[in-house]
Image (tube, rainbow, N blue to C red):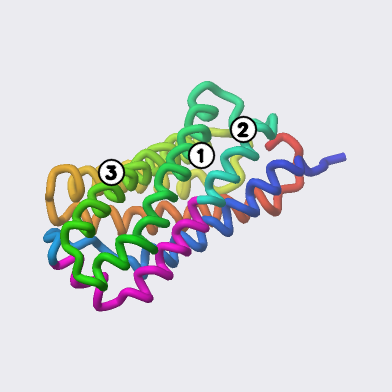
Amino acid sequence: MPHTNPAVRVAGTWLAIASSLLVAALVLHGPLAPDLSDQMKKIADGALAWSVIHWVSAASLSLFAVTGLVVLTSGSRLAGGWWTMTAWAVLTVSALWTMTTAVAEATVVTNAAVSGAEEMFEAWWSFAEGKASGIAFLALAVSVISGNEAQSSERAVPAWSAWIAMVSGVASFAGWALGRWFGVDFGNLLWVASSVLMSVWTLWFGVALMRSRVNVI
C-alpha cells in the first residue's frame, strides 16, 4: 500500500513557505540601482519597506536552509545521487550565507542610509554584497535539483516546468554575475525576473512534495 515519506513532506512544506516568501521579497525588492549613491537614497526614502523586505528574505532563506537539511537526511531519491546531494548541500550553505546579508541590510545598512553615514553605508554594503553572492550559487543548486527532477521517472511536477526552472536558475546566476560582478545594468533586471520564475517553480515543487503520497520520493 502506498505511504508517505514524512521527511519529504516536511521538506516540501518548508520549501513551499520559503519560496512564497522569497517571491514576495523579490517582487518588492526589485533591481538594485547601478550607482551606490542612488541605492543609498532609495533605501533612505523607503527605509521601513526595505527593512521589512529583508527580514522576510532572512526568514525565507532560513527556511531554505531547513529544507536542505531535511532533504539531506531524508534518505529519499531527492538526494540520492552525487550531484543532487551536493546541490542540496550547496543550497543549504548558500541560503545561510545569504541570510546574513538580509539581516545586515535590514539593520545596519538601513540605519546608515537613513542617517546619511556614507562611509559606514559603503563599508556595510560591501560586506552585504559579498555575502549576497551566495544567492547566485543557490540558483545554481536549484538548476541541478530541477534538472534532476525533469529527468526523473518519479518526478513530482511536470518535466517542462522543471526544465524551465533549470534555465531560470542558470539565468539567475548569470544575471547576478553580470549585474553585481561585472557592472552590466541589464543583469540586475535579469536576476530579479529569473529568480522570481525560479522561486515560483520551487513553490510548486514544494507543494507537490508536501502533498506526496508515495514513499518512492
Q: Is residue 18 above or below residue 73?
A: below
Q: Nearer the N terminus, badge 2 or badge 3?
A: 2
> Where does residue 143 sit, x and y in percent of width and height?
41, 39
Magenta stretch, main secondary structure class: helix
Alpha carbons under labels 3 and 1: distance apart: 17 Å
Q: Amino acid at mark 3?
A: Gly
* Tag nearer the camera, 2 or 3: 3
Q: Residues within 10 Å of mark 1 (few under 14, many from 20)?
A: many
- Mark 2–mark 1 CB contact (< 8 Å): yes
Q: Nearer the N terminus, badge 2 or badge 1?
A: 2
What stretch of residues is rendered in magenta?
Answer: 38-61
Q: Is residue 85 magenta?
A: no
On residue 72, the disc is 2
* Residue drawn at x 60%, y 34% as measured from the top left: 78
On residue 92, the disc is 1
Label 3 belongs to which residue?
A: 130
Q: Amino acid at mark 2?
A: Leu
Q: Residues within 10 Å of mark 3 (few under 14, many from 20)?
A: some
Q: Secondary structure at mark 1?
A: helix
